[in-house]
Image (cartoon, rainbow, N blue to C red):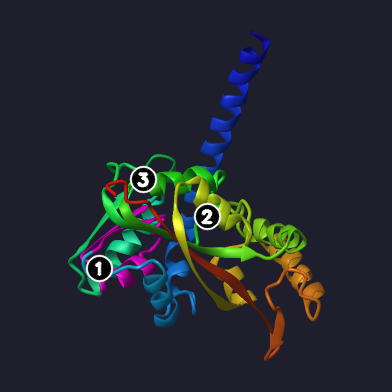
Amino acid sequence: MRRRSGFIPFLRKLAMNADQQRRLIVEQFTKQAVAFSQLPNHNNEETNRLVLETGQIGQEDTVLDVACGPGLISTAIARHARHVTGIDITPAMIEEARQRQISLDLTNMSWQIGDITRLPMADAQFSRVVTRYSFHHFLDPQSALREMARVCQPGGWCTVIDVFMSSTDQAELYNQMEKLRDPSHVRALQINEFPELFLNAGLLNFRTAYYKVEVELEQLLKATYTIPADAERIRSIFAADLKVDRMGVGSMVKSGQIFFSFPIMVFAGQKPNTER
């Protein structure tokens, strides 16, 4: 009985943490909705091609984009798939996505407001499920991937595109910096975590690709509305990391400004075909 009485407060604490994290995400990305979609190098044909190829996305596919944000990758996929559904927890992001769809004159798309913890979709509803730049915001990435796999059809593919770290030391400093810049950041996954996450979600036949997204630090801080005191601490972290690269982001000075590159993993796994 003691164990059970202690378990109830533990569950309540988990629920409170999840609610707090949802509020942080909505708060941060309501502010960032417009600026996020306009960041240079955040969306380009080459990286979109890697996503399409690695995720095995073709013209007959019905695709779910989880945590779709302003619809950057959703609209890119819609040019090559039968239909794309985007879902995001932040209403302002969904509105940006709708406006982007209209501006691009795409008719094979739909949008929903919802949470990754329980997607409002039926089992095996989509032939492809993707998420980009979202996993570092999740308290429980394993549960999120299992939920993606649930709504994926047997034989279909789930793809996670996100920043990754190569070592614990890199992750520690990077996460410290990112939490200052964006309080909704939880942690970047390390490269060796991806295969285990996918196996535990029942996804096999891995396909991978890598790319980098270069950004200018001051432009990024402005786009994410980082508070001045935290922005100054971030500048100090990058200044100390120049020519040392403890974060693994290749910090450098160009034309008097600090630039760095987010290392991005594209990791796809296939849901086994149970009919075989």
Residue neighbourhood size for the residue with mark 3, other residues' Cα within 10 Å, grouped as few (<14), some (14–19), many (≥20):
some
> Which residue bears the numbered disc 2?
135
Which residue is depicted at the point 49% across and 42% down?
A: 143
Kindly report which numbered mark, 1 or 3, lies closer to the viewer in this rendering: 1
- Quarter-of-image position of residue 236: bottom right
> Which residue bears the numbered disc 3?
114
User: Is residue 1 something one can see in this rendering?
Assistant: yes
- Span colored in magenta: 61-87
Looking at the image, which residue sits at the far front?
276
- Image: 176 above or below 274: below
Q: For the residues marked 1 and 3, what is the alpha-carbon distance in whole angstroms?
A: 22 Å
Looking at the image, which residue sits at the far top?
1
- Image: 257 above or below 159: below
Which amino acid does the dot numbered 2 rest on?
A: Phe
- SS class of the residue under badge 2? helix
User: In x, y percent, where is residue 96?
Assistant: 34, 63
